[in-house]
């Protein structure tokens, strides 16, 4: 469905929040991205004995109980403490780490939106939540299983199931913020949060909601998570050079670097946002999605499936390919995927050498898996708004398959550029693809 086909309901972004390897607030994260800093370091979250991969992009010194926003108790929870924090220490034990990251990002985005001052005029049934999560509480599953084996059934925490179910990130945010509209969680591997944003966009265009709290979260930096991807030979083993390990499009790439984080956007129907005088970052213009129907982990040759998602997003947005100035690539730093995506971009944007920049911010954050699409949509929005394209760091020798496209891959330094639209790609295992187009309002 096109953004213009349901009563001309346009969708804008009125709040953003994130925690990721580059920082714990949007200002810090964006500044570090523009400066080309890496958030990859030696893993601190678990014992690395015998672990073949010892590097990842962690959210360092993260505390989910930090104060967030001047909020009041929700109308249906008069006895609840004011929402001055994402969760208190007691409540935190009931949640997996991915939920902690989602709450921190979600509460920051909500505070940024200024919606709390208008809640008496907004019916909670017109506000919804969709937080994409790729794998859920994998570390918590492993920890509880260890307790089961060593101590027996009676030592399983009664909070185990709520800790690990992927949709509990959206569930907790809906309870904290009294969101009684659509409540969902897209689980589509590394496309999860991009699909969540896209589906939230469609919910607003067709009138199912006026406001959606949407994005993604992921936290699987654990023995089981790292070990599982390592035995697939999917991860970089550049353990002695953590900050140089994620190198999308470079001939020396040897796999992706796992990251973690949460990223949330407040999507709002344009007239609704304008009426309350909201700050607007930009507009969600188009959404495309497709399946490779090819292989469980490898992309289709020439990025055929991803190319169809990009083309669909352009049609949905009703814009010409030449109007797009920037593509935030999926660009994971894997030997096969990077070149296939580059070729797909070149095919969808035939005049790309004249007008397009590409970069992969995973070179700095690592791969946030289910949260990747959300943080990269935020980067794309800010790139359009600020006229600055974040770089692909560690790009020393461009792969010949990328060189042949003639496109600028924004190597190592940010680029100043005035443009109207950006496209963000997210592709996942199982051949699932999502593309989002954002633009100036």
Image: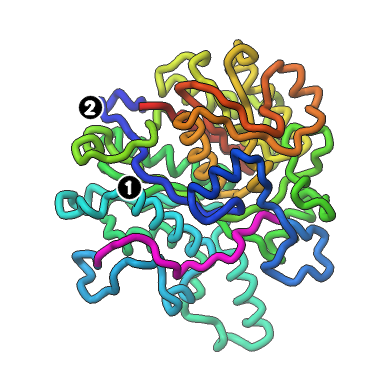
Q: Specify the label residue 7 is tagged with.
A: 2
Q: Nearer the viewer, residue 208 or 358?
A: 358
Query: Residue 59, located in which quarter of the rendered image?
Result: bottom right
The percent position of residue 238, horizontal first and vertical second, equals 83, 50
Taking 63 as reference, is 36 above or below it?
A: above
Q: On the picture, is 267 further left or further right than 165?
A: left
The percent position of residue 37, horizontal first and vertical second, equals 66, 45
Res. 74 in view: yes
Residues drawn in magenta? 56-72
The percent position of residue 66, horizontal first and vertical second, equals 44, 67
SS state under label 2: loop
Q: Specify the label residue 113 is tagged with.
A: 1
Q: Residue shown at 46%/34% (left/top)?
A: 381
Q: Nearer the viewer, residue 340 or 91?
A: 91
Magenta stretch encompasses residue 67 = yes
- Quarter of the figure that contains the C terminus: top left
Q: Nearer the viewer, residue 140 or 18?
A: 18
Query: Mark 2 and 1 residues: CB-CB less than 8 Å, in contact?
Result: no
Magenta stretch encompasses residue 25 = no
Q: Residue shown at 22%/27% (left/top)?
A: 7
- Quarter of the figure that contains the N terminus: top left
Q: Earlier in the sequence, mark 2 or mark 1?
A: 2
Res. 305 in view: no
The percent position of residue 63, horizontal first and vertical second, equals 51, 68
The CA distance from mark 2 to mark 1 is: 24 Å
Q: Residue shown at 34%/41% (left/top)?
A: 14
SS state under label 1: helix
């Amino acid at each position: 469905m096109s953004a213009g086909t349901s009563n001309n309901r346009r969708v804008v972004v009125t709040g953003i929040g994130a925690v990721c390897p580059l920082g714990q607030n949007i200002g810090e994260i964006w500044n570090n991205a523009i400066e080309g800093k890496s958030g990859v370091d030696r893993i601190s979250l678990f014992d690395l004995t015998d672990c073949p991969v010892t590097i990842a992009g962690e959210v360092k010194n993260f505390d989910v109980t930090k104060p967030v926003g001047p909020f009041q108790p929700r109308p249906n929870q008069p006895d609840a403490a004011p929402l001055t924090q994402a969760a208190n220490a007691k409540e935190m034990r009931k949640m997996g780490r991915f939920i902690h990251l989602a709450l921190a990002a979600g509460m920051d985005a909500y505070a940024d939106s200024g919606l709390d001052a208008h809640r008496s005029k907004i019916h909670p049934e017109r506000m919804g939540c969709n937080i994409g999560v790729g794998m859920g509480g994998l570390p918590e599953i492993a920890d509880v299983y260890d307790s089961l084996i060593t101590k027996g059934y009676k030592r399983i925490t009664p909070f185990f199931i709520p800790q690990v179910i992927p949709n509990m990130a959206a569930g907790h945010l809906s309870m904290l913020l009294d969101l009684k509209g659509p409540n969902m969680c897209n689980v589509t591997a590394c496309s999860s949060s991009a699909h969540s944003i896209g589906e939230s966009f469609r919910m607003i265009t067709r009138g199912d909601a006026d406001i959606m709290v949407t994005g993604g979260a992921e936290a699987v930096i654990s023995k089981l998570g790292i070990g599982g991807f390592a035995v697939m030979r999917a991860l970089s083993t550049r353990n002695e050079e953590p900050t140089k390990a994620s190198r999308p499009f470079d001939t020396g790439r040897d796999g992706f670097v796992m990251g973690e984080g949460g990223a949330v956007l407040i999507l709002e129907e344009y007239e609704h946002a304008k009426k309350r005088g909201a700050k607007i970052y930009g507009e969600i213009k188009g959404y495309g999605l497709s399946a490779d129907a090819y292989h469980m982990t490898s992309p289709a040759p020439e990025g055929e499936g991803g190319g169809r998602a990009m083309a669909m997003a352009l049609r949905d947005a009703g814009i010409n390919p030449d109007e797009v100035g920037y593509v935030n690539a999926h660009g994971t730093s894997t030997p096969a995927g990077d070149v296939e995506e580059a070729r797909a971009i070149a095919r969808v944007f035939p005049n790309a050498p004249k007008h397009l920049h590409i970069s992969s911010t995973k070179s700095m954050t690592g791969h946030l898996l289910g949260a990747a699409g959300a943080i990269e949509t935020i980067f794309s929005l800010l790139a359009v708004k600020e006229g600055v394209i974040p770089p692909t760091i560690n790009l020393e020798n461009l792969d010949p398959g990328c060189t042949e496209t003639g496109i600028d891959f924004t190597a190592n330094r940010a680029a100043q550029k005035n443009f109207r639209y950006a496209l963000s790609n997210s592709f996942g295992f199982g051949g699932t693809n999502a593309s989002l187009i954002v633009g100036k309002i």
